[in-house]
Amino acid sequence: QVQLVESGGGLVQPGGSLRLSCVASGDIFSLYTMGWFRQAAAESEREMVASITRDGTTDYLGSLKGRFTISRNTAKNTMYLQLTNLKPEDTAVYYCNAVPPRDSFWGQGTPVTVSS
């Protein structure tokens, strides 16, 4: 049973930065392409904002390229998302999951609020 636990979110002013973490219960990074997703509102769909393949190739939602950076530490079974120059429209709950996402992998997410 894969468990993913996200953390690192919070309230930040526009222009600020955060680093999100996703800790996996086992070594899943060698098995799956992984991604960070966000959901702006409960009724909205989750969108993928960044992904990293098993060999470390990264990709980003076009509008976020240059502001968000995905990385991982396989020894710690942890994936990260560095958020910089945050904007109010980045406010959302952020989740990690495999790509494509598995229903059973969804965690609780970590909320990010960008507001002055």
Image (cartoon, rainbow, N blue to C red):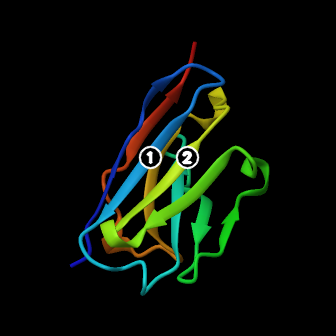
Q: In this image, 111 relative to 83: left or right?
A: left
Q: Mark 2: few, some, or many residues within 10 Å (few <14, many ≥20)?
A: some
Residue that badge 2 annotates: 82
User: Can residue 42 be seen from the camera position used here?
Assistant: no
Q: Quadrant of residue 2?
A: bottom left
Q: Position of residue 70 (x, y in %)?
A: 57, 58
Image point 24% across, 70% down: which residue? 25
Image point 56% across, 54% down: which residue? 45
Q: Which image quarter holds the N terminus?
A: bottom left
Vertical position of residue 75 compared to residue 40: above or below: below
Image point 52% across, 59% down: which residue? 36
Q: Which image quarter holds the C terminus?
A: top right
| Mark 1 or mark 2, earlier in chain | 1
| Most foreground residue, 115 or 47 | 115
Q: Position of residue 103 (x, y in %)?
A: 37, 72
**Residue at the outermost top position:** 116
Q: In this image, 105 relative to 29: left or right?
A: left
| Most foreground residue, 10 or 42 | 10
Residue that badge 1 annotates: 20
